[in-house]
Amino acid sequence: MEKARERLTAFFDVVKDDGRIGAPHLSLYLALFQLWNQNDFEDPISIHRPEVLALAKISRSTYHRCMNDLNDQGYVKYIASYHPILGSIVYMADLEASPGRRVDHR
C-alpha cells in the first residue's frame, strides 16, 4: 500500500510542472491507477476502453487523445489492441525511479 502512495505522489510531483497535462489526463491516469490497484499493482494491466471511459468520465475521443499523450510523454506505456475481446495493455511508469524525467518502457 505504501508503494502505491509513493507512486501516486511521484506522479503528481512530476505533472504539477508539466503544462501539457490537463484535467482529462489526470482523470484518465487516475482511472488507470485504479485498475492497476485492482491488479495488485502488477504490470502490465489489461484494460477495456468502456470500463476506462466510465471510470475516467471522459469521451472516447478524449480517451484516445489523452492516452496517446500519456504514452508519448512517458507516464504510461500503452499497447493498443484492436481485437474486440482482448484488452489493450498498459504499463504504469515508475516515476520514482526517474523523477522529473520521461520514463521510456520500450
Image (cartoon, rainbow, N blue to C red):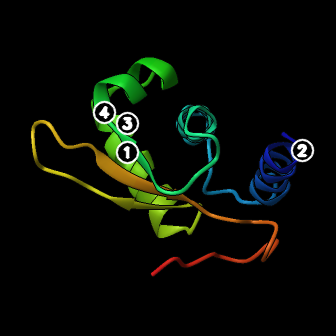
Q: Quadrant of the C terminus?
A: bottom left
Q: Which mark is residue 2?
A: 2
Sequence-earlier tag: 4 or 3 = 4
Instruction: Say which of marks 3 and 2 sits in front.
Output: 2
The residue that mark 3 highlights is: 62
Determine whether the residue tagged by mark 2 lies in a helix, strand or loop: helix
Q: Quick check: marks 1 and 3 in contact, CB under 8 Å?
A: no
User: For the residues marked 3 and 2, what is the alpha-carbon distance in whole angstroms?
Assistant: 31 Å
For image coordinates 73% across by 77% down, the residue present is 101
Q: Quadrant of the N terminus?
A: top right
The residue that mark 4 highlights is: 49
In this rendering, the answer to whether 74 lies above or below 18 is: below
Q: Which mark is residue 15?
A: none
User: For the residues marked 1 and 4, what is the alpha-carbon distance in whole angstroms?
Assistant: 10 Å
Sequence-earlier tag: 1 or 2 = 2
**Based on the displayed image, in which of its 4 quarters is residue 10 positioned?**
bottom right
Crowd rating for badge 4 (residues with CA inside 10 Å; few <14, some 14–19, many 20+): few
